[in-house]
Each structure stands twice: as C-alpha cells, then as structure tokens.
Amino acid sequence: RSCVSRVCAAASCQVLLLRRARRAFASQTDGEARVVQVLREKFPRASAIKVVDISGGCGAMYEIHIESEEFKEKRTVQQHQMVNQALSEEIKAMHGLRIFTSIPKH
C-alpha cells in the first residue's frame, strides 16, 4: 500500500475510535429508542431489552439483547424470527442486526 493509503486508513480508524468513545458516554440514540419502543410493545413480558447501535450512531446496524417469557419452549431460530417479525418495518432501513435472546431464569 502507498503511504497515502496507509495515512488515510489510520485516519479513518482514529475517527471510528473517537466516534465509539463518544458513543460510549452518550445517551440512547433516536433509532435505539425506537427499536426499544417497538420491542416493548411486541414483547410486553420482556424482563430486559437492550439495543445498541453498533454502526457508530448512523442506525445501519443494531445489536439487540432481549430476555422474555414469550421465548419459552421456542428454539433459538424461532425466537430470532419473532424479533425479526416484530421489527419488520424497522429492518427495511437497516444494514444488519445481531440478535441475542434468552428466557428469564427463575
């Protein structure tokens, strides 16, 4: 690689790290809040919902952790399908989604 491309790559990496550092101390983004709202409506028995924009705040990719009784006796793939269905409209504007589901331990 040329010297210029290495400098550009390093600068891009620094910008991304700064965005992530700022994001760590920021409050919830509008996109995260919207996804949480939809999930709370679709999974009223959820005991925990966490949504993180992992695309640097632009809303292209989210990581979702949701713990709910609604997932009881369902396979992981079925649980994820339930989340995908709940977010069917929001997913249209996303690049990707990481889903982690669990059942509350009593």
Image (tube, helix red, strand yellow):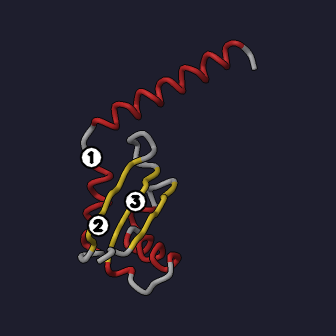
- Residue sitting at 70 percent across and 12 percent down? 3
Mark 2 vs mark 1: in front:
1
Q: Mark 1 or mark 2, which is nearer the start of the sequence?
A: 1
Q: What separation in Å lies between label 3 and label 1 (alpha carbons)?
A: 13 Å
In the depicted view, which residue is nearer to us: 13 or 66?
A: 66
How far across and how far down the image is residue 5, in percent? 67, 19
How far across and how far down the image is residue 91, in percent? 44, 62
Q: Quadrant of the C terminus?
A: bottom left
Q: Which mark is residue 53?
A: none
Q: What separation in Å lies between label 3 and label 2 (alpha carbons)?
A: 12 Å
In-image side of 48 versus 64 (left or right): left
Q: Which residue is mark 3?
A: 64
Residue 67 image-quadrant placement: bottom left
- Residue sitting at 38 percent across and 41 percent down? 57
Residue lying farthest to the front in this orientation: 106
Q: Mark 2 or mark 3, which is nearer the start of the sequence?
A: 2
**Are discs 3 and 1 less than 8 Å apart at CB?**
no
Badge 1: residue crowd in 10 Å (few <14, some 14–19, many ≥20): some
How far across and how far down the image is residue 11, in percent? 54, 20
Badge 2: residue crowd in 10 Å (few <14, some 14–19, many ≥20): some
Which amino acid, by three-letter code, is at mark 2? Val
Q: Which residue is mark 1?
A: 28
Which amino acid, by three-letter code, is at mark 3? Ile
Q: Which residue is mark 2?
A: 38
- Residue sitting at 60 percent across and 19 percent down? 8
Which amino acid, by three-letter code, is at mark 1? Gln
